[in-house]
Image (cartoon, coloured by chain):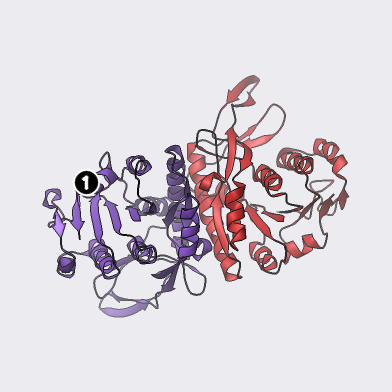
Chain colours: A purple, B red
Amino acid sequence: MIIVKIGGGDGINIEGIIEDLAGLEDPYIIVHGANALRDKLAEDLGQPKQVLTSVKGYTSVYSDEKLLDVMMMAYAGLRNKRIVELCHRHGINAVGLSGLDGKLVQGRRNKGIRVYQGKKLKIVRDFSGKPQSVNAPLLQLLLDNGYVPVLTVPIIDEQNAAINTENDDVVRVLQKALHAQMVINLIEAPGFLADKDDESSVIKDIGAAELEAREQQVEGRMKRKMLAVRKLFEHGASKVVISDGRTAHPVADAMAGKGTVIA
Amino acid sequence: MIIVKIGGGDGINIEGIIEDLAGLEDPYIIVHGANALRDKLAEDLGQPKQVLTSVKGYTSVYSDEKLLDVMMMAYAGLRNKRIVELCHRHGINAVGLSGLDGKLVQGRRNKGIRVYQGKKLKIVRDFSGKPQSVNAPLLQLLLDNGYVPVLTVPIIDEQNAAINTENDDVVRVLQKALHAQMVINLIEAPGFLADKDDESSVIKDIGAAELEAREQQVEGRMKRKMLAVRKLFEHGASKVVISDGRTAHPVADAMAGKGTVIA
């Protein structure tokens, strides 16, 4: 089982990815983002996103009810359905689902994020949280009947409310539930960069043991991504490839070991 | 099997409907609209909808690629996922799907709609069409495993492209595929009105044989709705209730025979 994570950046070559997947022999599921689309939609609707930075330095989007609405439109609506359509055009029998559907991805809502407002420490609670478990029988039911699940946020919390979460964390609980051997993470960069401003600084191989040290070297979203990768290995993944989603054949490239291979 | 169609008007009491469904003993599936939401979103995004009127007098929305995007956001995204969330809050194990997912609803794209532009006859082709068939095994798979499908547009055409269609037509193909005995159609009116401007003019009972005559008495969307109802009976429905979706308990009311009962 392979989990293919398609980043939500504007430059990702979704058509190339789906083309590649149509030729893949191993079973797989797709998890996708839509952050650039969400940000543009939020802007267009006059409600630009706000970003919170926790006291520990992790950033996240402030997810009030209105932002959840926008997410449902961008992730579970437009991006998910256009990917499903593209899959069918390439002969992939896709079924698009959010974490709400059949409680596919169940999480726990954050109690509150500790942030500084100026110099004052404040606790902000929004509709965000961490995925805890997966409705694996539903995924298995679809896979066994020849469907390819195409998953995205939001997920569902313990009170049955829709919450935002990081797709990287969704990949983590999916990997654990499905015992996926390999995770392909297609992003808007040629891999994990030693210097975030220099695309030629791709680190080819990272040992799983080095991940914690690497995490300390980076900031913002990449910091969170490295944390998510580290957790994948704690739960039994054997290979994670962080590879360029912008090339002509992103999945073929990742399978050939281009990008950063963590094993 | 009951098909519950939830209209897409602003005044529909979705929470009341879901509350009622939580207590329903018969198996059912949900089909929902989101036209008011779509129209508002299209306005907010600066691309207000255009309505075509065919030479035969049937109206439909001009569905170009951008409108399809907006539909995916409004129907398959926001409205579908919020209904699914509400279902889970009321203990209904809902799975939200568009007609694209697993090719759930397959249709044929319109060759073109004949419209008058001024006095000139013109053929306009957009991404709209008519549903032809249903992936009944996928629906049955979900139903057999305890899930309640929550369905909406768009659907998929013979070239695997997303197309817009009337949800009333989707209900028709679903009824045929699932041999549903009853269709509950919850709208923003107390039932079928003899005078469309007078809510007290509800026609309590209509014989299936009278439907064609009734269809000639009405205009616009209602004309299309009556045509869809007529086709339901051609395909074996035994009861259609057109009832008020705005009351405190719309489904309970419909089950009690309030609104227009067609049998």
- Give A246 or A16, whichever is nearer the viewer: A16
Is B92 on the left-hand or right-hand side of A198? Answer: right
Residue type pointed to by label 1: Ala
Residue B183: percent from left, percent from top: 74, 52
- From this viewpoint, which residue is outermost toward the bottom? A121
Residue found 70% across the figure and 34% down from its top? B58
Q: Residues within 10 Å of mark 1 (few under 14, many from 20)?
A: few
Residue A21: percent from left, percent from top: 35, 44
- Looking at the figure, which quarter contains the C terminus of chain A? bottom left
Report the number of numbered marks: 1
Residue A77: percent from left, percent from top: 48, 51
Does the image show residue B42? no
Is A167 on the left-hand or right-hand side of B66? Answer: left
Q: Say which quarter of the image contains residue B208.
A: top right
Mark 1 lies on residue: A256
Residue A231 higher or lower than B7, as above or below: below
